[in-house]
Amino acid sequence: MGIIADRRKAMTIKAFSPDSKIGGKCGKDRNLTVLEFHPGSYSDYTESELEHQLAELLKRLAEGYERAWTQILLEAGRAPVNDPAQVDQEAWKKYLTELRKVTVVGASPEKNIRFKTRGRTDYKCRLADGVLSRLPEREFSAQAVAASADLMRRFQYEIMMLKDECWGLGVPAITAERKRRKEQEQKQ
């Protein structure tokens, strides 16, 4: 592998919630891989407080990822391109503009934890009613990791559809699904 691929593969991003009672880690695929509570703090949260803390933790991990990725590119003599004004090609302008709008929801298999992101910059969390009293801390953390993996998988799928729309990758099922969704949005 090249230097960029090697450095990306080795990436580990760590962040804490705003109240510093929850720590998280993510790697090269942006998935939350570890979620840990400060000892004794899990039972102190209300659902709405924990929703806020988790959403902010995911946002901080995403920001850390972007900083690390930018640093890797700069050290390799490349500059990241995030702003549509930086490019001349219409396909790239469309891609970078639409990427900021991509909105997805991911959930744990049991639907106890749902994460939502818009453009991987804004995050929200929704917990099922009563989940904190039903799940022990370890199970909650495992479900949060699963919800994050689902969120990122769905986001990557949406990116693939957007790339097909912008550059015509020739993936018929993806193209058809993206067109169907656009038509539905226009009808609403």
Image (cartoon, helix red, strand yellow):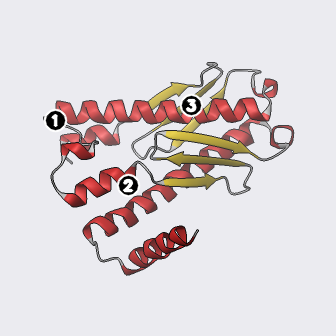
Q: Are marks 2 and 3 in contact (CB under 8 Å)?
A: no
- For label 2, the residue is 98
Q: First in sequence: mark 1 or mark 2?
A: 1
Front tag of 3 and 1: 3
Quarter of the image where the C terminus is located: bottom right
Nearest the eye: 118 or 146: 118
Dot 3 or dot 1: first in sequence order is 3
First reached walking from the N terminus: tag 2 or tag 3? 3
Residue 104 % position (x, y): 54, 55
User: Mark 3: few, some, or many residues within 10 Å (few <14, many ≥20)?
Assistant: many
Give the image quarter of residue 162. Answer: bottom left
Look at label 3 and name its amino acid.
Leu
Percent across and percent down for residue 134 are 85, 43
Q: Is residue 68 visible?
A: yes
Residue for point 70% across, 44% down? 126
Give the number of the mark in front: 1 or 2.
2
Q: CA distance from mark 3 to mark 1?
A: 29 Å
Residue 12 can be seen in this image: no
* Spot occupied by residue 57 in the image (x, y as percentages of width and height): 56, 31
What's the mark number on residue 76? 1
Determine whether 111 is above or below 47 in the image. below
Q: Residue at x 26, y 47 (%)?
A: 84
Q: Residue furthest left?
A: 77
Label 2 SS: helix
Q: Nearer the viewer, residue 92 or 160?
A: 92
Residue 138: give its label.
none
CB under 8 Å between callouts 3 and 1?
no
Check disc 2: other Cα within 10 Å, few if <14, some if 14-19, many if 20+: some
Asked if residue 19 lies left or right of residue 93, the reply is right
Q: Amino acid at mark 1?
A: Ala
Q: Secondary structure at mark 1?
A: loop
The label on residue 57 is 3
